[in-house]
Image: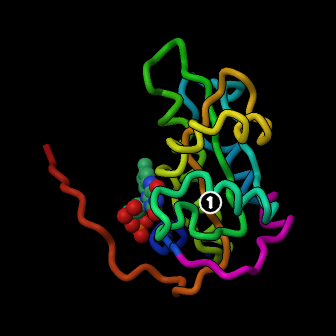
Amino acid sequence: METIEAIYSRHSSRSFTDEPVTDWEISLLLKAAQCAPVGHGEYDSLQITVITDREVLVEINEKTRFSSASSPIYNVPLLILVSAKPSALARNMHIASAACVVENMLIAAADMRLQSVFLWGFVERLKNCPELVERLGIETGRLPVCGAGIGHAVDGLERKAPHRIDVSYV
Ligand SMILES: Cc1cc2nc3c(=O)[nH]c(=O)nc-3n(C[C@H](O)[C@H](O)[C@H](O)COP(=O)(O)O)c2cc1C
């Protein structure tokens, strides 16, 4: 797929099948992540955690659930969590950097005809589970920021229509 088509077709999916993402696909997603722009080039402030273990995914789902009705990670077969150490050089820059890493993976996923969702909401509650964060191997000083949920979704591959963001020309 052309890059521009991957960008145009990416959209959020929130209903995934059990079909796993292959190791090869994961390796390409990670390569895309490693190519993301990162503020001040502080790549060593970031950490990527690839989670495919069903039991761990269920545990994250349970522990970060807001109400009994909603699943914050939508039963994704693959959750790639990006954690970051706040930069000493610019406030909140680590959040933008982590988001760039996630977006690169979402576009790469679209290119491979995988569906995805940017995940932010569950992280706030994950941060309140220090024991789980430790078991995920997130190093001290790095905080979970956001994640990519990726898999094969029940809905289609194509986005319905682009969104409208205000644009002005000067
Ligand atoms: C910073 C950020 C945080 C987001 N957090 C979540 C989230 O926690 N859960 C979710 O289902 N979608 C989340 N999304 C996805 C947006 O809701 C979605 O991208 C937006 O509604 C546009 O729809 P589209 O992705 O289908 O184009 C997030 C997106 C961004 C950029």
Image point (53%, 29%), residue name: 94
Image point (75%, 27%), residue name: 139
Occupied quadrant, residue 146: top right
Occupied quadrant, residue 58: bottom right
Residue 71 appears at what percent x and percent y? 53, 66
Amino acid type, residue under disc 1 in the picture: Asn
Residue linked to disc 1? 61
In the rendered image of this protein, does residue 64 appear above or below residue 158? Answer: above
Locate the N terminus and report the quarter of the image it occupies.
bottom right
Left or right of 80, for residue 120: left
Residue 100 appears at what percent x and percent y? 53, 44
Left or right of 31, for residue 61: left
Q: Please state the extent of the stretch shown in magenta in the rendering.
A: 15-27
Locate the C terminus and report the quarter of the image it occupies.
top left
Residue 16 appears at what percent x and percent y? 62, 78
In the rendered image of this protein, does residue 150 appear above or below residue 30? Answer: below
Residue 114 appears at what percent x and percent y? 65, 74
Q: Which of 137 and 90 is in front in this view?
A: 137
CB of residue at label 1: within 8 Å of ligand 1? no
Let me know if residue 24 is in the magenta part: yes
- SS category of the residue bearing label 1: helix
Image point (70%, 57%), residue name: 59
- For the rendered model, the colour scheme is rainbow
Image point (33%, 78%), residue name: 161
